[in-house]
Image (spheres, rainbow, N blue to C red):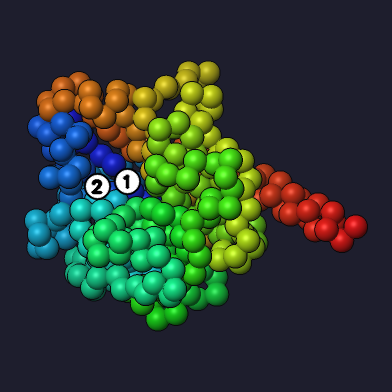
Amino acid sequence: MKNWCYWDGRIVKDDAGRYHMYASRWHHSFPHSTGWKENSKAIHAVSENIMGPYRDLGLVYPQWKDGKGHNVIGLRMHDGRYAVVTSEITQGEVFVSDSPDGPFELLGTIQWEANGFNPGLAAYQGGKGHMSNVKVLLRPDGRYMIVPRSTCVMISESGILGPYKIMSDRVYKHYPQLPQSKNEDPTVWYSGGMYHMVYNHWPSKTSHHFSSIDGIHDWKYRGIAFKKDESKIFRYTDGTINDWQFVERPTACVDEQTGHVTHFIFSVIDVTKGQDRANDNHASKIVVVPFDGEAFDRDMQNIVKNEKKEVQS
């Protein structure tokens, strides 16, 4: 742990009940400002409990570019295989394995079509560069859905590699009261009969929540999910509160049996990124926070139900 800085990640539960975290790390000899760009690699960690502790098992795919990867997430595919996705410092690749422990082999690079939208919604440099902040969701209708940094919705009818079609613009575009730039780190999930998205506006350290019934159209703003200086989300049962300088990369963990979110994971650091120097006492970490997804879904369903009543009246 002392040798590494950790970032990103998503937790995947296997058939035996173990929890696998696929995430990014770089060596502590790099400062944060260059570590994630020059030394970030995809790693696999495992725990018997979703809250941890997690044991770092090393690189996910050491045979490919020495394990290079960032914005790393893991998931189960519709056919039961395990997939690991990397973007930001790579094009947007998918690695797959029959086992959560690997070996993971390159399946290919994610393909996409602008579908009449701005191609810059999908990737940097007007669509010619890398994809970024890629989150992949297995929809209950059997399709794959990607939400990248821009928060647009991309849908694939043909499997995890696509081609994905951009189906919407930025979810916040029609909300002028919200910041229209410097947004990142979207997480997307399906629970309680609807789709949810939370993304981060990094200058204000504020994360915003949207919901949609079909996950493509009519994304409605639901308010602030959490704000770093106001939301005390890292509160322990004994009353202790951890106050991290940066709280980013929120990712929802949905229980497959109940369909509710049970935890969120966050990438955190106790100083500004520029103050995280090489070989110092600071290092970014991944933390797991419990969440009452059952109550959340119940409340959201009531909100939607009341909205429908207002429309009908």
Judged from this view, the residue extending furthest toward the bottom is 158
From mark 2 to mark 1, how far is it between C-alphas? 6 Å
Residue in the foreground of this view, choosing between 230 and 313: 313
Residue drawn at 50 percent across, 76 percent down: 142
Residue drawn at 10 percent across, 32 percent down: 29
Q: Which mark is residue 75?
A: none
Q: Quadrant of the C terminus?
A: bottom right
Residue 287, above or below 128: above
Residue 198, above or below 248: below
The residue that mark 2 highlights is 24
Three-letter amino acid code at the position of disc 2: Ser
The residue that mark 1 highlights is 8
* Label 2 neighbour load within 10 Å: few <14, some 14-19, many 20+: many
Q: Can I make out residue 18 in this image? A: no
- Quarter-of-image position of residue 285: top left
State if disc 1 and disc 2 touch (CB < 8 Å).
yes
Q: Can I make out residue 307 in this image? A: yes
* Disc 1 secondary structure class: strand
* Disc 2 secondary structure class: strand
Q: Is residue 218 left or right of residue 198?
A: right
Residue drawn at 69 percent across, 49 percent down: 300
Q: Is residue 19 left or right of residue 206?
A: left
